[in-house]
Image (cartoon, rainbow, N blue to C red):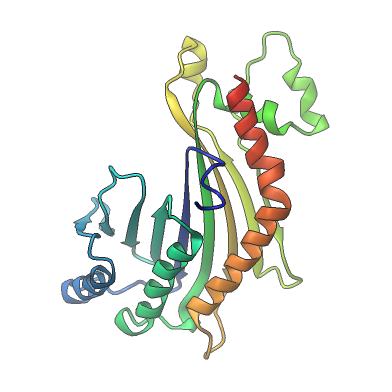
Amino acid sequence: MNQYSTLASDFYVNMNLNTEMPLPNARETVLDFFGRVQKSFPSMRNFYTRENGDFVLEEDKDQPAYRWVSMETRRICSGFVNPDDCDAAEEQHRLILDLVPYMLSVSPLDCEALDYTIGFDFAYRGNHDALVARALGTCAAFEGLMDVDGARVLNYEPSLTISLEDSCRLQARLFVESRTNAYHVRQNEFPEEMISVYFTVRQYGSMEHSASFADRLHQLRVRSEDLMDRVVIDQVLVPLGQAIAAS
């Protein structure tokens, strides 16, 4: 069992490679790329084009765990929802990153940013923003607003980005996303939706000529898992889970 599988309703491990130049979108190039991905993961047989022109290849999404890959104008994305272990997700991401230099002509010079993201979804029927504020707390400057007579929290989505080195090219971002809106609060009717927590470690900027995208992603994963173990799990994920269980 994955170390993260018991922390939330669902979790996922994603990779995003953002490029400075537009990616090729010729029919043959796109189909060759996704065909090569499908060769390694035959169960990824659902291929389609979104209305905005993005290309997507994915497994059936009605199963507990599934893979997906997408190609946008200037971004390649790869995701694995509820993998058995993070090694399986990294194997998929490494394949994509090994393919893009020679199939999509993406070089380390063309890298705008490379992301390694671990996301968690918590199913909850209620005011997401109020629950997040209660579980994670607010800064002292905001506490007075919370205590105003009749006040109900409408929007509270804490986000923090930190630099992990002096150059500020290596960063980590923690973001909590709620899905409650003013209509839900006004009617006091809340559908069961997901509270999402995203933790991303990102490398900004072009890489050295001899750099490997896949090796750099592994370095991001190592930093991510270290911070997850030291901070994010106990101070963010566990309190959210406990607050939902107690509601």
Q: Is residue 11 above or below residue 181?
A: below
Q: Is residue 63 above or below residue 57?
A: above
Q: Is residue 85 left or right of residue 156?
A: left
Tell me the quarter of the image containing the C terminus.
top right
Q: Is residue 7 above or below residue 55?
A: above
User: Given the current orientation, which residue lies at the most extreme front position?
Assistant: 1
Looking at the picture, how far across and down is residue 116, in whole percent?
A: 53, 62
Q: Is residue 181 left or right of residue 201?
A: left
Q: Quadrant of residue 227?
A: bottom right
185 or 61: nearer the viewer: 61
User: Given the current orientation, which residue lies at the most extreme left position?
Assistant: 28
Q: Residue at x 62, y 21 (%)?
A: 246
Q: Quadrant of residue 6?
A: top right
Q: Residue at x 45, y 73 (%)?
A: 20
Q: Is residue 74 above or below residue 209?
A: above
Looking at the picture, how far across and down is residue 159, in whole percent?
A: 64, 44
243 or 202: nearer the viewer: 243
